[in-house]
Image (cartoon, rainbow, N blue to C red):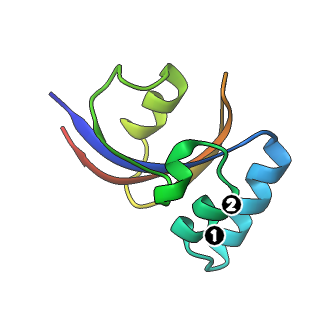
Amino acid sequence: MATAKARHILVSSQEECEKLKDQIEDGTDFVDVAKEHSTCPSGKSGGDLGEFSPGQMVKEFDQVVFSDEVGKVHGPVKTDFGYHLIEITDRTE
């Protein structure tokens, strides 16, 4: 069974999500941005979601985490919760 580890930043607008992604790509630490801006309770721990398997997260989230490049920041990814930046930190097939 595949598993992944990821962290994310959840915000309410696509514009804010894109602005934060630019900051991270310019060198600001993902964990610091998550702690300051994420509206998800996981933001307190730098957006860390721990390890999970397919089907444990919403479909849009799973599609990114289990198919896109590890170690890169992906997004904005829209879900019913808002807009996410997702960093896949590890994945096993």
Q: Residue at x 27, y 29 (%)?
A: 53
Side of 57 relative to 74 (left or right): left
Q: Which residue is mark 2?
A: 21
**Image coordinates for residue 61, horizontal then vertical, percent:** 50, 31
Q: Is residue 74 above or below residue 80?
A: below
Height in image: 42 above or below 77?
below
- How many labels were placed on the picture? 2
Please state the horizontal and vertical placement of residue 4, each as a whole percent of the image.
29, 42
Q: Quadrant of residue 14?
A: top right
Q: Residue at point 59% right, 42% down? A: 40
Q: What amino acid does circle 2 point to?
A: Lys
Contact (Cβ within 8 Å) of mark 2 with mark 1 = yes
Tell me where residue 92 sits by quadrant: top left
* Residue, far left: 1
Secondary structure at badge 1 equals helix
Crowding at dot 1, Cα within 10 Å, few <14 / some 14-19 / many 20+, comes out as some
